[in-house]
């Protein structure tokens, strides 16, 4: 019995020792302990879920609101201007005209005021007129008329000389010509003004300024950008139209100019406009095909309305070369009036006399500066007085 108990005690002791060894081998962190299984990727430890900066107890975190959507401002349209009326424009610009033109008048007055008027003096006077672009024919006619009147007059006081010269200049410029700009609508059909001329004369600018003149006179205007060969010309005309509240009809770049002119005329009829002004492409007078196209533009317009004015824009600084251009244009379309630009930039105001004499067409408008309102209806008396410095 005692032997049996001893065996039991031995077995229990061995069992206890064995259990203690296993505990030592497999306790956490103990030598030989198997590694802990990795945490699943979708699960985060508590430390990783904490924000990097310490948050005080009781503080709350808020998600910042989304940035407001900023909408682009609508394009700002230029403010519609109210231009001054045409009446008195040239009188207001008289000082500017005089600054550039008095050289001619003063030169003539000085020659006529000499004590002795011999052949050399009269030739010098003729040369002065020709240099001022009066033209050879008009210059000779004017000098012969002055010689005759001086002989009849006898004595010549400064006042008499000035009056004599003023009379001759007015005769040459022409006070009896009809310089009316025909812009009166025909019932429900607007008047149509066709603006023509070569490149570089200021044609598109003149078209925009003319729109200002007419709007200032209380007329409703539609502009036709028929210069489809230059996108800049249509953009420029668009700006002029927006400034005075005039609609602008334009077509695709390189499109048919006659189609644009037709659409502009139709728009004018639809909107009950008083005047439609059509700006054509600047055409070199040596290109027959382009000149024929200009004739087509005029014919297409006449399917909808009457072309009341064909204004030829000439640069006063081009002198007699401008005269040759004018003659070619007059052969293609019936030019009814001249718009003479840059008259303030030349002392050769005699171009007014020569262009009218050669074409039999009056100067109706003159450009006297770069300002928006520097286009004025031509007034012969204001012009001659500016020449003489009065």
Image (cartoon, grey):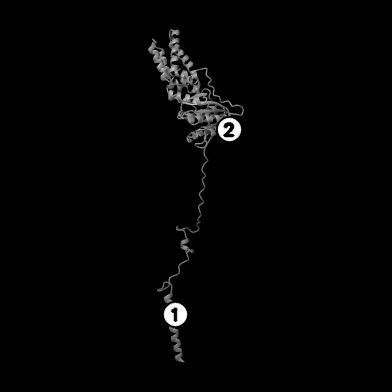
Q: Please, what secondary structure does the residue beneath circle 1 have?
A: helix
Q: Nearer the viewer, residue 306 or 333?
A: 333
Task: Tell me if I can see residue 387 in this picture.
Answer: yes
In percent of width and height, residue 224 lies at 53, 32
Task: Tell me if I can see residue 315 in this picture.
Answer: no
Residue 52 sits above or below residue 117 on the image: below
Comes first in the chain, label 1 or label 2: 1
Give the number of marks.
2
Q: CA distance from mark 1 to mark 2?
A: 111 Å
* Residue that extends furthest to the bottom in the rendered view of this protein: 1
* Residue at x 45% of width, y 86% of height: 9
Residue linked to disc 2: 266
Quarter-of-image position of residue 107: top left
Q: Nearer the viewer, residue 192 or 41?
A: 192
Mark 1 crowdedness (10 Å alpha carbons): few <14, some 14-19, many ≥20: few
Circle 1 or circle 2, nearest the eye: 2
* Residue that extends furthest to the right in the rendered view of this protein: 187
Label disc, if present, on residue 292 of the rendered structure:
none
In percent of width and height, residue 90 lies at 49, 22
Q: Nearer the viewer, residue 213 or 323?
A: 323
Residue linked to disc 1: 19
* Residue that extends furthest to the left in the rendered view of this protein: 120
In percent of width and height, residue 285 lies at 46, 28
């Amino acid at each position: 019995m005692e032997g049996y108990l001893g065996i039991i005690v031995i077995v229990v002791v061995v069992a206890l020792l064995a259990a203690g060894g296993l505990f030592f081998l497999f306790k956490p962190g103990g030598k030989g302990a198997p590694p802990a299984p990795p945490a699943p990727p979708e699960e985060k430890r508590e430390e990783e879920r904490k924000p990097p900066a310490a948050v005080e107890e009781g503080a709350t975190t808020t998600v910042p609101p989304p940035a407001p959507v900023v909408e682009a401002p609508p394009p700002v349209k230029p403010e519609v201007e109210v231009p001054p009326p045409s009446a008195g424009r040239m009188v207001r610009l008289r000082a500017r005209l005089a600054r550039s033109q008095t050289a001619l008048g003063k030169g003539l007055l000085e020659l006529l005021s000499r004590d002795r008027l011999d052949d050399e003096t009269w030739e010098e006077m003729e040369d002065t007129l020709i240099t001022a672009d009066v033209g050879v024919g008009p210059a000779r006619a004017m000098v012969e008329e002055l010689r005759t009147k001086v002989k009849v007059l006898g004595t010549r006081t400064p006042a008499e000389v000035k009056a004599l010269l003023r009379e001759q200049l007015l005769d040459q410029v022409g006070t009896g010509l009809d310089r009316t700009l025909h812009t009166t609508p025909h019932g429900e059909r607007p008047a149509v003004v066709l603006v023509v001329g070569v490149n570089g004369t200021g044609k598109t600018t003149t078209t925009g300024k003319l729109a200002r003149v007419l709007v200032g006179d209380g007329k409703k205007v539609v502009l036709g950008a028929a210069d489809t060969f230059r996108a800049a010309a249509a953009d420029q005309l668009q700006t002029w139209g927006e400034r005075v509240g005039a609609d602008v009809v334009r077509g695709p770049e390189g499109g048919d100019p006659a189609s644009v002119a037709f659409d502009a005329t139709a728009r004018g009829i639809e909107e009950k406009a008083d005047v439609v002004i059509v700006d054509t492409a600047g055409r070199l007078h040596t290109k027959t095909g382009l000149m024929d196209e200009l004739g087509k533009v005029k014919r297409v317009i006449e399917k909808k309305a009457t072309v009341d004015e064909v204004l030829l824009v000439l640069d006063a600084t081009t002198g007699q070369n401008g005269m040759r251009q004018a003659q070619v244009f007059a052969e293609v379309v019936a030019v009814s009036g001249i718009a003479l630009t840059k008259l303030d930039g030349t002392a050769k105001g005699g171009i007014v006399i020569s262009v009218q004499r050669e074409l039999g067409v009056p100067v109706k408008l003159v450009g006297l500066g770069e300002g928006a309102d520097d286009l004025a209806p031509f007034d012969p008396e204001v012009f001659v007085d500016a020449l003489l410095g009065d």
